[in-house]
Image (cartoon, helix red, strand yellow):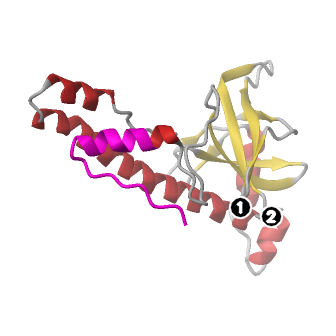
Amino acid sequence: AFANHRAGNNGVECECGSLLGRVAMGSLEYKDEEQLPSFCIAVKDQAFGEGAERIVRKVRFLDPANGAYIGPIMVAKESRFAGEYHTQMAYHKNFMRTQDIAASFGRRFNDALDEAEKYFDDAASQACIRGLPRILFIEPMVVELIENGVEKNILIERYLVGDYKKFNSNMGFVEDEVKKLVKQMNNLGVGVTIEPQQ
């Protein structure tokens, strides 16, 4: 993988070779000498989830001393289509950028709900606002690894325990539970709409 990277860099020597040595020793340093952690991970071969764009596998961090699982169960998301290292990284960067934008809207929404309660005098409306769900996003991270001599990267985030429920689709489906919540918010004068099915 590094030879291919060097060839793509017009044969110019780059830091990748020395970085690989540092990874092999269990540590990695940036130019500013900031110490970055190096981890041992176990990725399940069998996918437990597949979507139109991504394949999802369970991941665990390992204690390098004894190989025992440490930390929470995580998931690795890989693109079905991205093959080369830089294509994979571009895919993950786009996902993380989109996630960050969505999270900023979620925070603004949560802040608006937290502020809304003071505009209502009756206890029923205040209780209704307090009972509305808040939006939280999981923070993902990209992990670079070498697998069977090939450098690759995967996006990892915490595994959510529980039953998965799809509330909407790209084809216009919206779950009744969401429609009820929108009606409840509209009754408070929030003015939420659901796009009509096309």
Which residue extends farthest left?
Answer: 121
Residue type, label 2: Gly
Q: Is residue 135 visible?
A: no
Q: Earlier in the sequence, mark 2 or mark 1?
A: 2
Q: Residue at point 73% right, 23% down? A: 63
Q: Mark 2 points at which residue?
A: 83
Residue type, label 1: Gln
Taking the magenta stretch, the answer to whether it contains residue 178 is no
Q: Name the residue under label 1.
A: 88
Q: Quadrant of the N terminus?
A: bottom right
Give x and y (percent) for residue 90: 64, 65
Q: Residue at point 63% right, 26% down? A: 161
SS type, badge 2: loop
Q: Quadrant of residue 140?
A: top right
Q: Is residue 122 visible?
A: yes
Taking the magenta stretch, the answer to whether it contains residue 189 is yes
SS type, badge 1: helix
In magenta, the rendered stretch is 179-198
Which residue extends farthest right?
Answer: 148
Q: Nearer the viewer, residue 68 or 136?
A: 136
